[in-house]
Structures are given as structure tokens and as C-alpha cells.
């Protein structure tokens, strides 16, 4: 008799088991929504799927009477633009800092304590400082994402750099490579797929900082819209927006995974070994 610890589901069953909790959640929500709406048709806490669909059609398919814009798509474009800028800048800075502090011992000894301290500062705590110093424009929102996830990426890249076998570095230097050549030709190629993995892991935090900054000071964006309609208890808008953010996060993560697999197929096979 097999222990539960050793049981594994094959592909068809695994897909079914993966969908089961989602289906159950939808069913439970539907039943709870019907019960509340029957007791109080004007209840806003648990809107029906029809109400949410009508709200999304109004937001996504009908132009706003005041601005003529399709608010749902304007919000999505604004948030994705801020997230993309923030993550790209953070990835570049994290790679630069992580490689230098991880490959050059003197730099690592000098700056690693500072990097650790910075990584422990709650980024949301310095958001008011960013607004005071930078202002309420787009730069402050991007800066919060950069400050929030750069230390994480840098520390991860630093640790990955330390994992590179020292034999490779010694062989490269024995063949006459200088410091910059070792970094560019030996270290960087091995770290690029790990950088994408680090970015994937930091995306959740990136979304958190984005939504927080949009909620406080913005005129468009997914986070801005959620916190704008909350004062009216418009759950028929809030819930679809939250679901949309989740779908976007999942899609970006999936695309990065496929991109990583396409560019660095050896990385996945190496992990499996």
C-alpha cells in the first residue's frame, strides 16, 4: 500500500485536480452571492457574475462620457507601462550590483552590509519621501518599484555568482582573461537565466508597490481605479479588476518562463540534472 506522501497524479488527473479548487471557489461564491442578493437586491458586497459582466462591459467597451476614453484599457496600459519601466530598471541595477559585489571580493565586503540594510527598509515607508523629493508624477511610482525590488534581485544575483564553481574562474584567468573578460564571458552568460528567475520572483512585490503608489497619487491605473470606486463600495468593479491583475501577473510570469526556456534551454536541463 502506497503512502499518500508517494502518490502522484498523472497529467489528466493533475489538470482536473488543479481546476477543482477554482471551480469550488466559483460555486461557493455564486451560491453566497445569490443568497445575499435574494435577501437584499441592493447588496453590494457580493455582486453577481451578471453585475460584474455589465460593469466590465461599461468600463472596457463603452467610452467614458466625460473623457471619451475606454477606462479599463487606459488603466491597464498605464499600470503595465509603470511596471515595465520599474522592473527593467530594477533588473539592470540588480544585475550590475549583484555581479560586481558577487565577483569582486573587495566590493562585496564593502557594499554587502549596505545592500542588506537597504533590503530591510520597507519600501512603502519611504513612499512619502519619494513624493516629497520627486513629486507625484510617474517618476515616483517607477522609483518605488525600483527601490522595492532592486535589493532583492541584487542579493539573489550576488548569491548566484558565489555559486559559480571557482574552477571556471581560475581556468579563465589561467588562459589570460582579465577581470572584465571573466565577468563578461564566464559569469554573465551563466547569470542571465537566473536573472529572469529573480525577476519572476520579484514580480509579486512589484505589483504590490505599483498598486500602492497608484492608490495614493494617480489619475489612472488599475490600483487607482480600485481605490477610487471603493468609496462607492463598487465590488462589481473591484473584483473583476483584481481578477484581471491576477491574470496579467500570471501571463507575464508565463511569458518570462517561456522566454527563459527559449533563450537558455540548457538552464532548465541543468536544473533537472
Image (tube, helix red, strand yellow):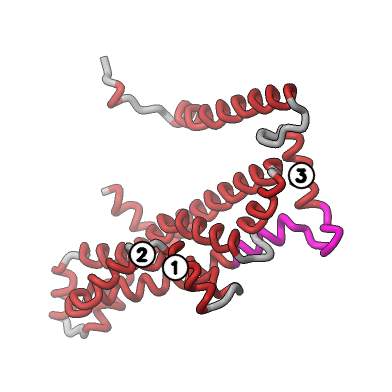
User: Secondary structure beneath disc 1?
Assistant: helix
Which badge, 2 or 1, is on the more N-terminal residue? 2
Neighbourhood count class around disc 3 (C-alpha, 10 Å): few under 14, some 14–19, many 20 upward? some
Report the residue at 35% width, 67% height from top: 151
| Label pair 3/2, CB-CB below 8 angstroms | no
In space, the residues marked 1 and 3 are separated at their CA atoms by: 35 Å
Instruction: Say which residue label 1 marks.
Output: 126
User: Secondary structure beneath disc 2?
Assistant: loop
Residue 190 shows in the view: no
Determine whether 199 is above or below 1 in the image: below
What count of labels does the image hold? 3
Quadrant hosting residue 117: bottom left
Which badge, 3 or 2, is on the more N-terminal residue? 3
User: Secondary structure beneath disc 3?
Assistant: helix
Quadrant hosting residue 140: bottom right
Tell me residue 162's x, y (percent). 21, 66
In space, the residues marked 2 and 1 are separated at their CA atoms by: 8 Å
Instruction: Say which residue label 2 marks.
Output: 121
| Label pair 2/1, CB-CB below 8 angstroms | yes
Amino acid at each position: 500500500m502506497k503512502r499518500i506522501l508517494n502518490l502522484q497524479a498523472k497529467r489528466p488527473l493533475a489538470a482536473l485536480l488543479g481546476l477543482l479548487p477554482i471551480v469550488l471557489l466559483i460555486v461557493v461564491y455564486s451560491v453566497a452571492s445569490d443568497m445575499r442578493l435574494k435577501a437584499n437586491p441592493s447588496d453590494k458586497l457580493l455582486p453577481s457574475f451578471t453585475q460584474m459582466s455589465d460593469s466590465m462591459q461599461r468600463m472596457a467597451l463603452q467610452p467614458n462620457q466625460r473623457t471619451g476614453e475606454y477606462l479599463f484599457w487606459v488603466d491597464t496600459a498605464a499600470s503595465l507601462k509603470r511596471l515595465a519601466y520599474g522592473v527593467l530598471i530594477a533588473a539592470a541595477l540588480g544585475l550590475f550590483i549583484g555581479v560586481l559585489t558577487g565577483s569582486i571580493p573587495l566590493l562585496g565586503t564593502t557594499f554587502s552590509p549596505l545592500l542588506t540594510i537597504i533590503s530591510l527598509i520597507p519600501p512603502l515607508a519611504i513612499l512619502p519621501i519619494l513624493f516629497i523629493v520627486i513629486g507625484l508624477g510617474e517618476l515616483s511610482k517607477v522609483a518605488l518599484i525600483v527601490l522595492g525590488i532592486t535589493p532583492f534581485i541584487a542579493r539573489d544575483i550576488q548569491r548566484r555568482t558565489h555559486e559559480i564553481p571557482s574552477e571556471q574562474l581560475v581556468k579563465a584567468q589561467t588562459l589570460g582573461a582579465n577581470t572584465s573578460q571573466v565577468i563578461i564571458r564566464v559569469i554573465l552568460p551563466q547569470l542571465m537565466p537566473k536573472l529572469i528567475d529573480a525577476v519572476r520572483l520579484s514580480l509579486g512585490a512589484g505589483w504590490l508597490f505599483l498598486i500602492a503608489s497608484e492608490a495614493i497619487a494617480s489619475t489612472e491605473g488599475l490600483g487607482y481605479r480600485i481605490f477610487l470606486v471603493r468609496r462607492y463600495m463598487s465590488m462589481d468593479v473591484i473584483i473583476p479588476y483584481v481578477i484581471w491583475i491576477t491574470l496579467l501577473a500570471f501571463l507575464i510570469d508565463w511569458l518570462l518562463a517561456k522566454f527563459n526556456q527559449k533563450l537558455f534551454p540548457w538552464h532548465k536541463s541543468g536544473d533537472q540534472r
